[in-house]
Image (cartoon, grey):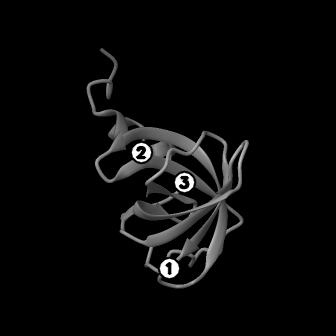
Amino acid sequence: MPFGEDLPRDIRNRHKRRGLRVNSRVPLTIEWNGTSGPLHFEPGFTRVVNSYGCLLVSPREIDMQQHLRLTNLATRGYADGVVVWKGSQRPDGWEVGVELVGADLNFWGVEI
């Protein structure tokens, strides 16, 4: 077995990430256009944030590559993003990985 293959996947892939990740629960409003319906507004929150995106929890399922607008309810700032990963539904909602598009590096309001 090659060196490192026995390590957990998140540790093996850590060098591929673009920045430090911080566990932080940031309250959000998630906004997006449905494929065949009206504009959706849902409450949500993050589990993990970094300068380039987040792992958020949404009460509704959101499709891959869906464009979103996130409003940080703590700072009232907003940022656009794209769904780049979709996890499973958990008791508190769907886990969704979002890459931010052109966001202010201080968007989360936490030290990263």
Category of crowding for the residue at label 1, using alpha-carbon neighbours closer than 10 angstroms: few (below 14), some (14–19), many (at least 20): some
The residues tagged by marks 1 and 2 sit, at their Cα atoms, a distance apart of: 29 Å
Q: Mark 1 near mark 2, Cβ–Cβ under 8 Å?
A: no
Residue bearing the label numbered 3: 18
Q: Amino acid at mark 2?
A: Arg
Q: Residue furthest front?
A: 37
* Spot occupied by residue 18 in the image (x, y as percentages of width and height): 54, 54
* Spot occupied by residue 98 in the image (x, y as percentages of width and height): 56, 53
* Residue in the picture at 37% in, 36% down: 12
Category of crowding for the residue at label 3, using alpha-carbon neighbours closer than 10 angstroms: few (below 14), some (14–19), many (at least 20): few
* Nearer to us in this view, 17 or 36: 36
* Residue in the picture at 53% in, 41% down: 85
* Residue in the picture at 28% in, 48% down: 91
Residue bearing the label numbered 2: 14
Task: Give me the disc on residue 73.
Answer: 1
Q: Name the secondary structure under disc 2.
A: helix
